[in-house]
Image (spheres, rainbow, N blue to C red):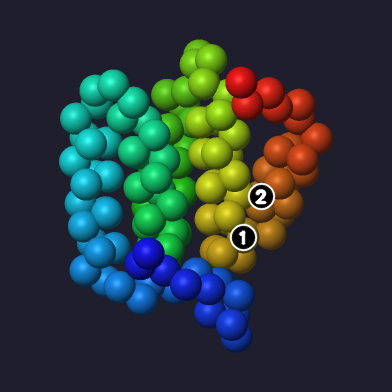
Amino acid sequence: MYTRINPHTLRDEIVDRTTFEKEVSESLSRCQLRKDNHLSYCSKLGELYRLDGNYQAAEDILKSVLLDLEDSSDEKLVFLTELRLAIVYQYAGDWENALNLFEKLEFEPFNPN
């Protein structure tokens, strides 16, 4: 694992930069291939950008994934991507958007099957 929770801030922090960079590189290349389940890798890439503190890039890619998923039946990936976006908003201090998205996720029915 390349992250841990900082006991003082309760936020993720990267502790193994080499492994983290490999994960970013793999997710980026699979996302760009636009084959098979590339949107899963793009969503993961958004999470990785957030971990590295690049909130704007994280927000941009997660919103793009959600646009691509509009007509998708992959409810699990939609939910996961929205959750990742809500966390990006939270970390970036965008409390209104974070709260709105967290509330949507809390009250919207979700069937993971």
Judged left or right of residue 65, residue 107 is right
Residue at horizontal 27 percent and vertical 45 percent from the top: 27
The residue that mark 2 highlights is: 97
Residue at horizontal 35 percent and vertical 67 percent from the top: 2
Is residue 74 visible in the rendered structure shown here?
yes
Is residue 52 visible in the rendered structure shown here?
no
Q: Callout 1: 10 Å neighbours few (<14), some, many (20+)?
A: some
Q: Is residue 112 above or below residue 3?
A: above
Q: Could you tell me residue 66's position as x and y percent? A: 49, 31
Amino acid tagged 2: Asn
Q: Could you tell me residue 46's position as x and y percent? A: 40, 48
Amino acid tagged 1: Gln
Residue at horizontal 60 percent and vertical 85 percent from the top: 8
The residue that mark 1 highlights is: 90
Judged left or right of residue 48, residue 91 is right
Task: Name the one closer to the observer, 58 or 24.
Answer: 24
Q: Earlier in the sequence, mark 2 or mark 1?
A: 1
